[in-house]
Image: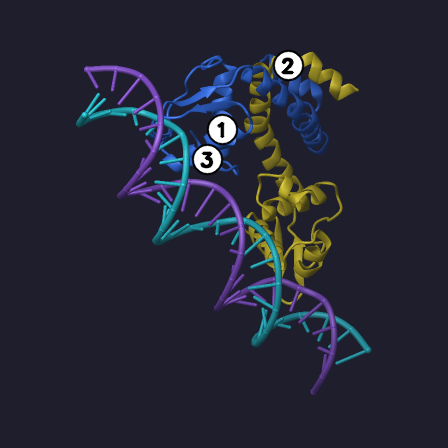
Chain colours: A yellow, B blue, C cyan, D purple
DNA sequence: TATAGTGTAGCACTCTAATAGTACACAGCA
DNA sequence: TGCTGTGTACTATTAGAGTGCTACACTATA
């Protein structure tokens, strides 16, 4: 993963990644996700950083914890994430993209071409 | 300005804002930009934070300094910024936007509609 | 020549991110 | 009952962002 290439905090990038994997169907409802130590080794970050990501996602009600066992995907998490992301995409991302396009003189046709190409 | 709503550092958001203003034609070649103290008051941040932004933009060759006088826009800065931003938009932003669309099941038509609406 | 407005260079402080390591209570299983 | 793998709770350290403040050298102008 390209962590420090981003302005975003690593623990948030990890949370995003896990959400991506849930959307992709890698982890389904009530599936167990990797342990904090396991995921830390995989991503080559500190355990505490993954702990912070899992804490964050628990507070967002996307994963839940069973004592001594690990973290699991909350029922309906996938749709929950998609709803949050769609809202963000429509209300934040897309308007900012359109602003950039106007500012840079990039037409919608150019975007459509790149999309289809 | 909506500073802490973003994951990005404030001094980088300020640099972005100034670049936006240069592109918009608010400051042209060899125009003087606001002093660090002035801009700090306007944006309600600390002077040192603006200093950091101006340092950053100087190293990027977008503004330059005259001792005792202030900071000025480098010749050709506007086209320079546009070139950098176009590259970033095409190689980073747009691919990520398309990835999000595929992931969220958002079609290009929906984007076109929002753009025209 | 004084004065006001420039950038610049410090210092001290707080906060958060991230790393590193240790220790402990819990659950499942041999 | 032990053992292993869970999360959790600490402590400590490093680094950077951001704030607040002071002081100084430079430039133009009254």
Are discs 1 and 2 both within one chain? no
How many marks the image carries: the answer is 3
Q: Name the residue: 64% across, 40% down.
A: A5
Residue placed most toward the observer, B60 or B103 = B60
Q: Does A3 appear above or below B12?
A: below
Residue placed most toward the observer, D13 or A106 = D13
The quadrant of the rendering that contains the C terminus of chain B is: top right
Q: Does A36 appear above or below A7?
A: below
Parent chain of label 1: B
Q: Name the residue: 76% across, 46% down.
A: A26
Examine the image and state in which quarter residue B51 appears: top left
Q: Name the residue: 66% across, 16% down.
A: B112
Parent chain of label 3: B
Residue D28 in percent (x, y) is at: 31, 17
Parent chain of label 2: A
Q: Does A66 appear above or below B14?
A: below
Residue, disc 1: B15
Closer to the observer: label 3 or label 1? 3
Q: Secondary structure at mark 2?
A: loop
Q: Are marks 3 and 2 in contact (CB under 8 Å)?
A: no
* Mark 3 to mark 2 CA distance (whole Å): 31 Å
Residue, disc 3: B52
Say the numbered circle drawn on residue A106: 2
Comes first in the chain, label 3 or label 1: 1
């Amino acid at each position: 993963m390209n962590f420090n290439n981003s302005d975003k905090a690593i623990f948030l990038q990890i949370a995003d990644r896990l959400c991506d994997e849930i959307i992709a169907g890698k982890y389904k409802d009530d599936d167990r996700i990797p342990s904090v130590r396991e995921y830390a080794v995989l991503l080559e970050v500190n355990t505490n950083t993954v702990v912070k990501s899992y804490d964050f996602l628990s507070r967002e009600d996307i994963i839940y914890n069973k004592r001594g066992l690990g973290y699991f995907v909350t029922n309906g998490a996938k749709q929950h994430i998609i709803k949050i992301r769609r809202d963000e995409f429509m209300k934040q991302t897309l308007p900012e993209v359109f602003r950039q396009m106007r500012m840079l003189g990039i037409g919608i046709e150019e975007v459509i071409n790149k999309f289809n190409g």
